[in-house]
Image (spheres, rainbow, N blue to C red):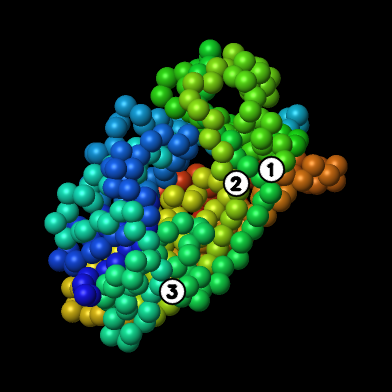
């Protein structure tokens, strides 16, 4: 027996749930299919990851009615960001205190966003969510597509949206190739308390042999992100707490005093992905299924939120004009609006990672020069800050066309 839906979303992660939230005020009938259980979706557990929201992302979440469902007591303002290069005095610094904005961005635990998104979607009458289920294939039938479950159930739909992670199985099944970049690194994250205040400042230190980041949380606590080579990760994950505390205190040069691990240590292999196209017949990729970023620039969630917002806006326009929501013209317009920025961010970020994780003496000198140049060339700092905050003033407009071509 076949069931019909207007839209089928494969994957109920942040991107899929965000798109579903965008469709709550429409009359389209939506089905979400997720491998995980409904219990895990409704009550996600802390996973160590903090999401750095840009002002645009915050605006989207507010528009979706999701932001008010986030536990505000766990939201931390990001007022300043500092980038260091090993033991070099080279520094790139961004601040929000010289503008009309309260912060560069907003740090929110990943599980809080997931919980708020699911809460919003679960209240919708036009959205069905099926857990513990997998999609085996999607078959294009002309006027509709047929979604085939792993247990051979069938669902017909006008549009299929894949949001099933950067390792998307359905992306491969419909024939969309993707570029994968294995960084041979593992990201280890945990929550740590510290004696001194972080003053709402994020730190990024491209230390020699490892990368250290600190994201300020509420109170005297921070999310610490340690990125190391894959063959070194197991030793750090198995390290007892006393030794780990001592390592982190030493690695951060005692800047925040004694550091003490509070949460569990979580690890994530770093693999970047970019699909070569975001669309197929009656099919679109969003979130990590379209582009999975290296976390160094903290743009993964923000790009996913932007992409679903673009697609949702086009679908709503089609509905308003009585047009086909799965048409090739609509999907091509979505791709045109989104893919060029993601390519720039993906390859630009990979270039930054390559530069700042290469410890060859000549490369060290190059990146020190890059940091010094960026720190003392205001248009570059303006462009990055403006991208984060959507500031309206632009004292460096003559430089903008040139700056937008830079990878960072």
Examine the rendered structure and indicate whether residue 85 appears above or below residue 327.
Answer: above
Q: Identify the residue shown where x is 23% and y is 80%.
A: 323
The Cα atoms of the two marked residues, 1 and 2, are separated by: 8 Å
Examine the rendered structure and indicate whether residue 295 appears above or below residue 5.
Answer: above
Which residue position is annotated with label 1? 230
Measuring from the top left, give residue 39's x and y in whole percent.
Answer: 29, 43
Q: Identify the residue shown where x is 54% and y is 21%.
A: 261
Measuring from the top left, give residue 174's x and y in whole percent.
Answer: 46, 75
Q: Pointer 3: residues within 10 angstroms few (<14), some, or many (20+)?
A: many
Do tag 2 and tag 3 residues touch (Cβ < 8 Å)? Answer: no
Q: Identify the residue shown where x is 50% and y is 28%.
A: 264
Marks 3 and 1, the one that precedes in the sequence: 1
Report the disc number at residue 343: none
Measuring from the top left, give residue 179's x and y in whole percent.
Answer: 60, 65
Q: Identify the residue shown where x is 29% and y is 67%.
A: 8
Q: Pointer 2: residues within 10 angstroms few (<14), some, or many (20+)?
A: some
The Cα atoms of the two marked residues, 3 and 1, are separated by: 33 Å
Residue 391 shows up from this direction: no
Marks 1 and 2, the one that precedes in the sequence: 1
Do tag 1 and tag 2 residues touch (Cβ < 8 Å)? Answer: yes
Quarter of the image that includes the N terminus: bottom left
Which residue position is annotated with label 3? 279
Question: Image quarter for residue 334?
Answer: bottom left
Q: Is residue 8 left or right of residue 183?
A: left
Which residue position is annotated with label 2? 269
Examine the rendered structure and indicate whether residue 326 appears above or below residue 250.
Answer: below
Q: Pointer 1: residues within 10 angstroms few (<14), some, or many (20+)?
A: some
Question: Image quarter for residue 255?
Answer: top right
Q: Residue furthest bottom?
A: 142
């Amino acid at each position: 027996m076949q069931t019909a839906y207007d839209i089928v979303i494969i994957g109920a992660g942040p991107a899929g749930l965000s798109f579903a939230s965008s469709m709550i005020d429409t009359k389209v009938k939506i089905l979400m299919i997720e491998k995980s259980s409904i219990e895990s979706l409704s009550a996600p557990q802390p996973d160590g990851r903090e999401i750095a929201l840009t002002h645009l992302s915050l605006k989207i979440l507010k528009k979706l009615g999701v932001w008010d469902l986030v536990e505000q007591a766990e939201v931390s303002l990001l007022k300043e960001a500092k980038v260091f290069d090993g033991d070099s005095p080279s520094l790139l610094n961004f601040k929000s205190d010289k503008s009309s904005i309260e912060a560069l961005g907003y740090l929110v635990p990943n599980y809080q966003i997931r919980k708020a998104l699911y809460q919003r979607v679960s209240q919708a009458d036009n959205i069905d969510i099926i857990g513990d289920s997998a999609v085996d294939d999607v078959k294009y039938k002309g006027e509709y597509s047929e979604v085939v479950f792993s247990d051979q159930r069938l669902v017909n739909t006008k549009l299929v949206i894949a949001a099933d992670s950067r390792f998307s199985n359905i992306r491969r099944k419909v024939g969309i190739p993707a570029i994968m970049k294995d960084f041979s690194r593992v990201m280890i994250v945990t929550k740590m308390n510290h004696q001194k205040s972080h003053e709402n400042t994020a730190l990024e230190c491209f230390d020699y042999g490892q990368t250290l980041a600190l994201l300020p949380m509420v109170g005297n606590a921070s999310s610490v992100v340690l990125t190391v080579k894959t063959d070194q990760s197991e030793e750090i994950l198995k390290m007892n707490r006393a030794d780990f505390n001592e390592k982190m205190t030493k690695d951060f040069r005692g800047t925040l005093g004694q550091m003490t691990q509070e949460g569990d240590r979580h690890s994530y292999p770093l693999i970047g992905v970019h699909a070569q196209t975001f669309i197929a017949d009656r099919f679109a990729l969003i979130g990590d299924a379209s582009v999975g970023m290296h976390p160094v620039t903290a743009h993964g969630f923000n790009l996913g939120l932007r992409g679903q917002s673009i697609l949702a806006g086009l679908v709503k326009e089609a509905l308003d004009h009585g047009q086909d929501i799965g048409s090739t013209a609509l999907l091509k317009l979505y791709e045109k609006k989104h893919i060029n920025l993601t390519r720039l961010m993906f390859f630009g970020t990979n270039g930054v990672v390559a530069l700042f994780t290469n410890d060859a003496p000549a490369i060290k000198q190059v990146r020190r020069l890059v940091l010094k140049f960026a720190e003392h060339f205001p248009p570059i700092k303006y462009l990055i800050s403006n991208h984060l905050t959507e500031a309206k003033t632009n004292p460096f407009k003559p430089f903008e066309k040139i700056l937008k071509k830079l990878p960072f």
